[in-house]
Image: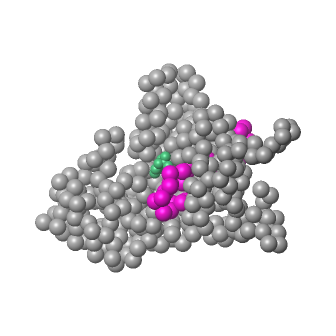
Amino acid sequence: MTPDPHAHAVPSLAPATVAVTAGRPSRVQGGPVNPPVVLSSTYVSRGIPGDEPLYARGGTETWESFEQALAALEGGEHGIVLGSGMAAIAAAIGDLPPGSTVVVPRHAYQVTLGYLDDRAARYDVEVRRVDVADTEAVVAALDGADLLVVESPTNPMLEIADLPALLAAARDRGVRSVVDNTFATPLGQQPLALGADVVVHSVTKYLSGHTDIVLGAVVTNDDRIAADVRSYRTLHGAIAGPMEVFLALRGLRTLHLRVERAAANAVELARRLHDHPAVAEVRHPSLPDDPGHGRAAAQMAHFGAVVGVRPVGGRGAADALVDAVRLWVPATSLGGVESLLERRRRLATESPTVPEDLVRLSVGVEDVEDLWADLAQALERATA
Ligand SMILES: *Cc1c(COP(=O)(O)O)cnc(C)c1O
């Protein structure tokens, strides 16, 4: 697909405009405004060298539009869509030759941690788990390391890393850096501009935004990394289906509207939870007394829409809270238009340093008063 010359004529478009306009087909009289969804596994091809596309594992027109739009939002050169967030993470981590050392937050997406632990168990790979909010400790762990994988805010503890400092330290030491930007979205922070080599996304979450697909993506400015990730995608068959990518692009067009509302709802709910007598602790970087508040205010454009809450009464009260909601949906995952909640430690694989009674809220785009009324009644019943 040829990029739309009009969409690229003005380099300094605001993110909301990029979300709506990037990755459109060329403007031709009578042509479609949206890219076609090509439902074909193979393409007519007579064997002329350079014939493309040849076969749908190699790429489709539908992928390219989404890849261009996401790359534009992240301020990156190459966007690469893969079959899931985990496929994107595995591709971005790439080969870990024997003797490799990886630095990763002790609180991070549990399957990312599981993937690295699996590498460590099978091969001669060292995984250094760090408190990502402790910049000195992370920088010390980077000595002799090969790869830094970061989340900020972290899942599910919502710790904020000093991204500019950590990414600069990694660069100085020749350590490749991968930032999982799923929680912040490119509207919250652009890790490539802060010094990251690679950004990964679970497109399943905010980017698609409607809890109807599983999809992932990688964005980078590095030609070699991009070629490696594309090669990983083909060799492992970690490809996206055209319908999934179509839905992701459709969702991406309203990313700014959804994230703006969800993040505003989260700020309001975090404030009310903070003042509620049935709540022992709230984690959200918007709260002035949250340990990550200053950093988040400095490096993020919004505070995100995931909130951590620990009700008075411990694990039993946390389970009762999840049972007592009517509007909120008890479910894992995040980033959709609907509000979800779950007690994270119900998952056997969640880190034991995450409190047993931590309930993770993924705040959606409903009316904030309705969300609050349901949470407040559930809290009262759960802690009665
Ligand atoms: C969900 C998630 C992933 C995994 O993505 P999938 O699309 O479910 O494979 C990775 N990182 C974070 C932060 C996530 O929330």
Q: Residue pushed farthest right?
A: 48
Percent coordinates x, y for residue 18 in the rendering: 67, 66
- Magenta residues span 200-227
At 79% from the left edge and 64% from the top edge, which residue is drawn?
26
The quarter of the image holding the C terminus is bottom left
Which is nearer the eye, 78 or 221? 78
In the image, taking residue 166 as reference, residue 47 lies left or right, namely: right
Percent coordinates x, y for residue 147 in the rendering: 56, 35
Percent coordinates x, y for residue 323 in the rendering: 22, 60
Residue 177 visible, this orientation: no
At 46% from the left edge and 23% from the top edge, which residue is drawn?
122
Which is nearer the eye, 3 or 246? 246
The quarter of the image holding the N terminus is bottom right
Q: Is residue 220 magenta?
A: yes
Q: Is residue 259 magenta?
A: no
In the image, taking residue 227 as reference, residue 366 lies left or right, namely: left
Residue 33 visible, this orientation: yes
At 66% from the left edge and 58% from the top edge, which residue is drawn?
37
In the image, taking residue 368 as reference, residue 263 lies left or right, namely: right
In the image, taking residue 73 as reference, residue 300 lies left or right, namely: left
On screen, 284 above or below 116? below
At 47% from the left edge and 33% from the top edge, which residue is drawn?
116
